[in-house]
Amino acid sequence: MPIKSTTFESATDIRYEIQVETSEDKPRFSGVLVLSFFGHYRPGHLGAPDGEFMRGIMQAALGVWRPAGLILDFRRLDYVWGDEMEEVLGCRGEIRAPYAVVLGDRCGPAITTLVRQFHPGIASETELDHIFDDMEEAWRYVHQQA
C-alpha cells in the first residue's frame, strides 16, 4: 500500500498562532490562551477541511495548555461561508472554557449570518455576549468569566 508523509498544514491554507498569558503570580493553568487563525477559509463544503483543521488545533491547544479562558482571534481570517465554522465558534456548546471571539471585517458579516441560525433575533454578531470586534473587550470579558 503506498503511503506519503503529510502535515496538518498541508490540508488547508489556514494558519494559526498561539499565545499564552503568563504571569509570575499565576499558576500555569490560570491564564488566557489566544488562538489566532488567519488565511483564506474556502467557501461552502470546500471549507470543511479548513474548519476541521481549526477545530483540531483549538482542541489540541486547549488540551496542552488547559487555560482558564480562550480568545479566538479571527481578525485576519477571510471567511464567507462554511458550516464547519459552527463548531469552531462553539455554537452548540463545544467549547467548555470561558471564551470570546474577536472578528474583523473579512469574516464578521458571514459569521453574523451563521450565528443568526442559532440566535435569530440578533442584528449583529457582536450583540452576543462573547463575540467582539475589539480585542480589549474580549480580554475583559474572558477575565470576568474565568
Image: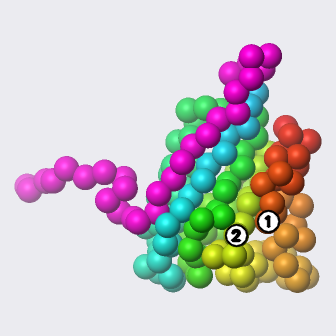
Q: Name the image quarter holding the C terminus.
A: top right
- The answer, for residue 84, to whether it is visible in the render is yes
Q: Are marks 1 and 2 in contact (CB under 8 Å)?
A: yes
Secondary structure predominantly adopted by residues drawn in magenta: loop
Residue drawn where x is 57% and y is 43% of the image: 18
x and y percentages locating residue 123 in the rendered image:
88, 83
Give the label on residue 35, or none: none
First along the sequence among labels 1 and 2: 2
x and y percentages locating residue 125 in the rendered image:
81, 73
Marks 1 and 2, Cα distance to the nearest angstrom? 6 Å
Element at badge 1?
A: loop
Magenta residues (range): 1-28
Number of other residues with Cα within 10 Å of mark 1, as a class: few under 14, some 14 to 19, many 20 or more? some
Residue 77, picture quadrant: bottom right
Q: Name the image quarter holding the N terminus.
A: bottom left
In reply to whether residue 13 is colored magenta, the answer given is yes
Vertical position of residue 40 compared to residue 136: above or below: below
Position of 41 compared to 72: left or right?
A: left
**Mark 2 is on which residue type?**
Gly
On the image, numbered disc 2 is attached to which residue? 104
Number of other residues with Cα within 10 Å of mark 2, as a class: few under 14, some 14 to 19, many 20 or more? some
x and y percentages locating residue 57 in the rendered image:
51, 49
- Judged from this view, the residue extending furthest toward the left is 1
Residue drawn where x is 68% and y is 22% of the image: 28
x and y percentages locating residue 90 in the rendered image:
70, 59
**Mark 1 is on which residue type?**
Asp
On the image, numbered disc 1 is attached to which residue? 133
